[in-house]
Amino acid sequence: MTVVVPFHKEIALIARAVNSVFANANAVDDLSVVICNDGPFQEAEIYAQLGREGGGRVRVVPNVGSKGPGGARNIGLDMADGELIAFLDADDFWLPGKLAVQVAAVRAGATFVATGYTFDKGRVVIRPPVSLSDGQHDVFLKRGLGTSTILITRELLGSHRFRNIRFAQDIDFWHRLTKSPDFRFLSISTPLVVYSTGGSTKNKWVQLNYLNKVLSLNEVSFVPRCRVLSSYVMAGVANHYLRPFLCGLRNRASG
C-alpha cells in the first residue's frame, strides 16, 4: 500500500503526518509513504524532520510535473507500488484505526472508501455521503469527501490522474472516478482524520470560482451548476461559521 503526501512548506507538520500513517501500519503488510516535494525545502531537510521514520519506507521525491497539489499527487500516483493508494495532506493527520476499517471495506468489495473527519479547531465533524453515483452530480452536491480520508484501489485508479487546477482539483478527480465501471463506494461516518484549517485559502470566493471552473470542465449544465454553487455556499457557511458557533455555545453551557 502507498500513501501519497503532497508537500509544499509544511516542514513543522510533516513528521506528525507521517507518524500518523505508521501508527496505522498494522492494518497492511506493506506500507510506504511517498512525499511529493513541491516546495522550497530540500530532501535532506524533510528527512531530518522525519528521522528516517518507517525504516526506509518513506521516499521524498521532487515534483517535476505541474506545480500545485494535483501535480504533486500525480508524481506520487506514478510511483505508487501497492494495490491500495491513500491520500494524506502534509498538514493533516490520521487517527488510529483509519486504515483498518478501510482495508476491511476493500476486502468487502469497495474500491473507493471515505471516512469522516474533524477540523483541527473545534468539534465540527464532516461525514462523507452515504452513497455516491455519477448520474446526479453527487460528488459536487453532496461533497464531504476530505482528501486525506480517501483510500482507493489500483483497479479504480487505472490511468486517472489529477488535473492541473489550483483548487477543487480533488473534487474533480473524485467526480471522474465515479464514472468508472470499477467505482464501488463505501462511506465510513466515523471521523478518523483531523483536517488542518491553516492550509486552506481564507478566500472562499476563490474556491467558489475554481469549483465553477471544475463544473465547466465536466460540462455540468446551467441548472445543476446553480444548485451545486448555491449548495456549496450554504454548506461553507454552516461548516465554517454556524456549526463551530453552535458547538461553542454548547461547550460553554456544559462548562
Image (cartoon, rainbow, N blue to C red):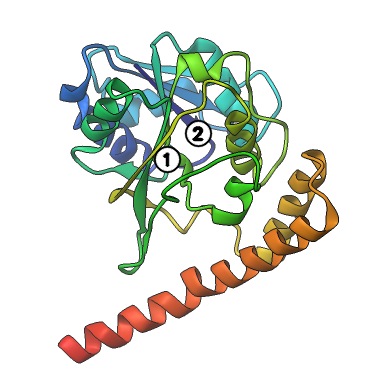
Q: Which residue is more in the foreground, 224 or 146? A: 224
**Three-letter amino acid code at the position of disc 1:** Ser
Numbered badge on residue 225: none
* Label number found at residue 148: 1
- 198 above or below 69? below
The residue depicted at 80 percent of the width and 39 percent of the height is 217
Eyeballing the image, is 249 above or below 105? below
Q: Which mark is residue 7?
A: 2
Helix, strand or loop at disc 2? strand
Q: Residues within 10 Å of mark 1 (few under 14, many from 20)?
A: many
Categorize mark 2 by other alpha carbons within 10 Å: few (<14), some (14-19), many (20+).
many
Q: Is residue 203 left or right of residue 95?
A: right
Answer with left or right where residue 103 lies relative to residue 183: left
Place residue 64 in its image quadrant.
top right
| Residue at the (41%, 76%) spot, across then down | 243
Q: Quick one: label 2 or label 1, which is nearer the N terminus?
A: 2
Mark 2 or mark 1, whichever is nearer to me: 1
Residue 225, position as x, y percentages in the image: 76, 56
